[in-house]
Image (tube, rainbow, N blue to C red):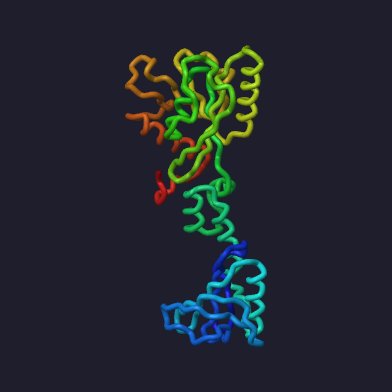
């Protein structure tokens, strides 16, 4: 950076913006600080007019970092002042750096931030949309299959009412959980059954609509469920609900089909990883939950 400047913060409006300039420039109206030190100063135009009151940090013998006000008008004025001193915008990597800051600001969860910090804007080997939006997981199945119990356990608090009375859940209820750094939106839904009053039928319509937009569907299948052929679709992750009512149960609330486990928390984590696999999202070791 012998004769160029570069912004170190994104172009979005902010209280403070950072710009790096060569220490040889005459932008600053006072003697420069020693390397590793900072001081208050004024940033000035070539004609001597003051542009902004700033904090100047001497990063090295050749490089300064200036903290100025970050509004669009001030950034434009700072750029004009740089140009008046013969400094040009650095063209190596500046655009990608700005885009990376924007991407980080939009990141949907810790795993997305971790990916962007480690890999930058390279095309990920998983659906890119999940860097910026949360996947939705619909929990469905017959009435009294344990859907609301599963939602509460996964959220870590009582998000939905739980009752032995069929039809307790009429509307769609949402909660969130974190699995290996990826945040998931969980949707509890009315139990699948035919008939019922107008409110129950409206609840069934909501389930059908949510199934069309969900990224993953978890189907809770309680003992004696006979709705498998007409309710379960290809791609559903099937979970055996109410394991305590099954023969040879081991005290678990749920057991994922074909997935062994020794505790409810182990199963929740295992089912969570199964959801990530269905979404083709990697478990991020640095932010594993």
Nearer to me, 110 or 42: 42
User: Quick check: 257 left or right of 137?
Assistant: left
Q: What residue is shown at x 50% (from left), y 48% (from top)?
A: 109
Q: Quadrant of the C terminus?
A: top left
- Residue 102 image point, x, y percent: 59, 58
Q: Please, is residue 185 above or below residue 284 in the view?
A: above
Nearer to me, 248 or 173: 173
Q: Quadrant of the N terminus?
A: bottom right
Q: Please, is residue 120 above or below residue 281 in the view?
A: below
- Residue 234 image point, x, y percent: 56, 27
Q: Please, is residue 182 above or below residue 174 in the view?
A: below
- Residue 150 image point, x, y percent: 45, 28
Nearer to me, 109 or 74: 74
User: Quick check: 195 left or right of 249?
Assistant: right
User: Quick check: 52 left or right of 39?
Assistant: right
Q: What residue is shown at x 55% (from left), y 42% (from top)?
A: 134
């Amino acid at each position: 950076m012998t004769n160029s400047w570069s912004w170190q913060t994104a172009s979005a409006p902010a209280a403070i913006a950072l710009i790096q300039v060569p220490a040889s420039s005459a932008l600053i109206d006072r003697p420069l600080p020693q390397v590793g030190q900072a001081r208050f100063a004024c940033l000035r135009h070539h004609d001597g007019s003051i542009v902004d009151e700033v904090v100047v940090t001497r990063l090295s013998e050749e490089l300064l970092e200036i903290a100025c006000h970050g509004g669009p008008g001030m950034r434009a004025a700072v750029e004009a002042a740089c140009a008046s001193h013969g400094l040009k915008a650095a063209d190596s990597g500046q655009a990608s750096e700005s885009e990376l800051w924007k991407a980080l600001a939009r990141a949907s969860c810790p795993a997305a931030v971790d990916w962007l910090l480690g890999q930058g804007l390279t095309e990920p080997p998983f659906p890119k949309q999940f860097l910026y939006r949360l996947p939705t997981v619909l929990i469905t199945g017959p009435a009294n299959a344990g859907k609301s119990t599963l939602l509460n356990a996964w959220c870590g608090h009582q998000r939905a009412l739980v009752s032995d009375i069929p039809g307790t859940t009429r509307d769609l209820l949402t909660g969130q959980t974190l699995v290996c750094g990826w945040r998931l939106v969980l949707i509890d839904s009315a139990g699948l059954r035919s008939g019922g009053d107008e409110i129950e039928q409206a609840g069934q319509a909501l389930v059908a609509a949510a199934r069309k937009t969900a990224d993953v569907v978890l189907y809770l299948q309680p003992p004696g469920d006979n709705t498998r052929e007409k309710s379960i679709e290809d791609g559903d992750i099937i979970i055996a609900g109410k394991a305590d009512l099954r023969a040879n149960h081991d005290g678990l609330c749920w057991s994922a089909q074909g997935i062994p486990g020794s505790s409810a928390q182990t199963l929740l984590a295992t089912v969570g990883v199964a959801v990530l696999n269905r979404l083709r999202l990697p478990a991020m070791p640095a932010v594993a939950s």
